Image (spheres, helix red, strand yellow):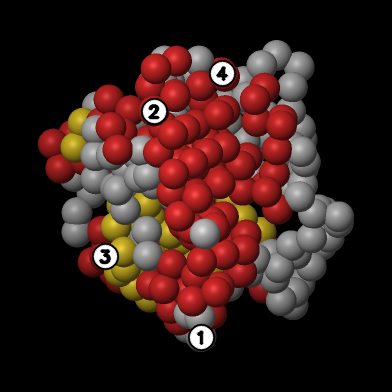
């Protein structure tokens, strides 16, 4: 990746993180940890990968993106706002009654959301249906979804994986946000889904393992996915939960906790400092 493009995407990822913190703080609730971990993935998807147009959000030929780990909605909302689907100021009204940005994605209320999610496992299932629809209709659009590694404990995920592999949905790319933590603790202690790569391989998926906070590795993985034929692709993305906010990184307690005023100020200070360096 060229330096200028990398810098542009790093800035976008930082702004996504700023949006996450702003939204969760103002809502006084939400899920910052697993939202922060996917900032680079969303920056690359909405900055480079997805064929979408915020001026025509329902274009039938658009690529689809489904946030299967729907509790990370603040990250998706920040990415959509920065892409131009709605004003960034809307994120200050996260989870407020009557506003468009609710605690989990709502396809009927938020421009750019392709599927309502929140009940874990359902997002990847819907992605399989969309990918099959494209195949049956001879459409060229691709379908992308992001799952949490804790979400892999849902049996529905593996039914979907079996279906996608059997149907050879090579227009489907599933990214596992492998940050190692879920609401109750480390995935290895709650109910380990390992070996994740071998499970997807057994269901006839092409598997790629990357550092999910590295834009260069993300770029290579999505390029490899597009060049894979006859199989869906699973990208196992090793990430840091709470990435970008020092006191949240790798701390399970920040799975579903909003920062107080002092913590918010510290997070904003850290992210503003990072943005200043990137924009210098």
Name the side, left or right, on which 161 lies relative to 132.
left
- Numbered disc 4: secondary structure: helix
Q: Quadrant of residue 201?
A: bottom left
Q: Which residue in the structure is indicated by mark 4? A: 27
**In the image, what residue occupies the spot 51% across and 85% down?**
227
- Where residue 202 sits in the image (x, y, percent)? 29, 69
Q: Which residue in the structure is indicated by mark 1? A: 227
Q: Nearer the viewer, mark 3 or mark 4?
A: 4
Q: Which residue in the structure is indicated by mark 3? A: 197
**In the image, what residue occupies the spot 69% across and 44% down?**
81
**In the image, what residue occupies the spot 71% across and 76% down?**
140
- Numbered disc 3: secondary structure: helix
Point out the tag, 4 or 2, that comes first from the N-terminus.
4
Residue 273 tag number: none
Q: Which residue in the structure is indicated by mark 2? A: 266
Do callouts 4 and 1 mark residues in contact (Cβ within 8 Å)? no
Label 1, residues with CA under 10 Å away: few <14, some 14-19, many ≥20? few
- Numbered disc 2: secondary structure: helix
250 relative to 145, above or below: above
Name the side, left or right, on which 117 lies relative to 166.
right
**In the image, what residue occupies the spot 37% across and 52% down?**
177
């Amino acid at each position: 990746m060229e330096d200028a493009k990398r810098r542009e995407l790093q800035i976008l990822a930082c702004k996504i993180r700023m949006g996450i913190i702003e939204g969760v703080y103002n809502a006084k609730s939400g899920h910052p940890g697993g939202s922060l971990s996917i900032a680079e993935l969303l920056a690359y998807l909405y900055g480079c990968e997805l064929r979408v147009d915020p001026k025509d959000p329902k274009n039938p030929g658009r690529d689809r993106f489904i946030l299967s780990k729907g509790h990370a909605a603040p990250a998706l909302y920040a990415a959509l706002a920065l892409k131009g689907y709605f004003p960034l100021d809307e994120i200050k009204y996260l989870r407020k009654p009557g506003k468009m940005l609710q605690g989990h994605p709502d396809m009927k209320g938020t421009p750019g959301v392709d599927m309502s999610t929140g009940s874990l496992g359902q997002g990847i299932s819907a992605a399989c249906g969309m990918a099959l629809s494209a195949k049956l209709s001879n459409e060229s659009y691709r379908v992308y979804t992001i799952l949490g590694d804790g979400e892999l404990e849902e049996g529905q995920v593996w039914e979907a994986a079996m279906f996608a592999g059997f149907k050879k949905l090579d227009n489907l790319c599933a990214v596992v946000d492998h940050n190692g933590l879920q609401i109750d603790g480390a995935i290895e202690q709650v109910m380990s889904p390992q070996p994740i790569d071998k499970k997807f391989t057994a269901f006839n998926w092409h598997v790629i393992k990357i550092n999910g906070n590295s834009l260069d590795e993300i770029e290579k993985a999505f390029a490899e996915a597009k060049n894979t034929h006859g199989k869906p692709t699973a990208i196992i993305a090793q990430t840091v939960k709470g990435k970008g906010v020092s006191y949240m990184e790798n701390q399970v307690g920040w799975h579903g906790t909003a920062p107080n005023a002092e913590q918010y100020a510290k997070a904003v200070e850290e992210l503003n400092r990072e943005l200043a360096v990137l924009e210098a």
